[in-house]
Amino acid sequence: MNNYKIAVIPGDGTGPEVVNEGLKVLAAAAQKFGFKYETVNYDFGGARYLRTGEVLPASAIGELKTFDAMFLGAIGHPDVKPGILEKGILLKLRFDLNQYINLRPVQLFDARFCPLKDKGPEHINFTVIRENSEGLYAGAGGNLFKDTPQEVAIQESINTRFGVERCVRYAYEYTQKYSRKKQLTLCGKTNVLTYAFDLWQRTFNEVAKEYAEIKTDYAHVDAITMWFVKNPEWFDVIVTDNMFGDIITDLAAMIQGGMGIAAGGNINPDGVSMFEPIGGSAPKYTGQGVINPLAAIGAVAMLLREVGEDKAANAIEKSIRLVVTTKIKDLAAGKMGYSTAEVGDLVVKHL
């Protein structure tokens, strides 16, 4: 019997509430599908920072490398200046744990929850693969003459052949293994960002020679945002850089029904990966029992697939789909017709 060690970071705001439901479903799946696991909780987040002044202890990265996977609720506290927790926890974990892929499946389960006219589940079913450790998020740059009329701010996008190629290769492998249409699209801005995306385009084209069965194409990021709205059915798998991936996946979340259903993974294919709902801490809903936990439960399914428990992952996703299509009234917080805990119970019931 497989036994997994999972690090749990409930985090801030509604993070602990949705994590509780994810763990509830994980326990039911383990019992049904015959695997074991143990969890270790970490209190990283705004409350710890306000109490101790420490974002991450020095021992954190080394400890987390010993786990099979990580499950994150949310990071973001209204009493902490923006950027402190995001850089000190989220980006540091991604960079130091070498989680160089951000994986975002995008699937609409019920046309009722799509804001696009005449679009249903058959039109919105694609995956965005975002490079997760370079680009504008690498932190290169600085200020000159700060707080003066002559201030200069420089933020540099770092793109290495090594980093781009390993992301592109992951995208081709993922397309070969999981995609419906065996189609991979590169999203960039080759007409303006001529240095960075020349590297991306050349790498994409060279690696394509090893995957003759995969259809490839290219689209500017601004065009993709238009086509997500007009023709989302065109897409199968999309690969892109850090910044563009951050932007287009939020748009993708909206057309699949909103942040309450959107899950993602920060993947190190050779190490420990971290899975999370992408909606944030939503502090205004904290403690009310109204936040939608389905994204966090979907993140548990992604976690299980990453460690090889495909049957359990498929069952959870099937149950989520059933709950969305036959039970809840809305995906938005406070409008589901059920409490946070009751939605978790429904997923367990239909596993």
Image (tube, rainbow, N blue to C red):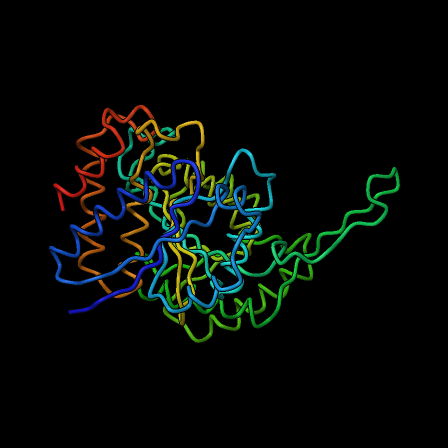
Q: Residue at x 22, y 39 (%)?
A: 344
Please name whichever residue, 341 or 135, is drawn nearer the observer in this view of the structure: 341
Please name whichever residue, 106 or 43, is drawn nearer the observer in this view of the structure: 43
Q: Quarter of the image holding residue 290?
A: top left
Q: Quarter of the image holding residue 337?
A: top left
Q: Residue at x 39, y 28 (%)?
A: 285
Residue 128 percent location from the top left of the image: 43, 52
The number of discs equals 0
In the image, residue 238 sits, relative to residue 64, either above or below, namely above
In the image, residue 309 sits, relative to residue 29, either above or below, namely below
Q: Which quarter shows the N terminus?
A: bottom left
Residue 33 percent location from the top left of the image: 13, 59
Residue 334 percent location from the top left of the image: 32, 24
Q: Is residue 161 left or right of residue 38?
A: right
Q: Residue at x 31, y 62 (%)?
A: 306
In the image, residue 303 sits, relative to residue 229, either above or below, namely below
Residue 348 percent location from the top left of the image: 16, 43
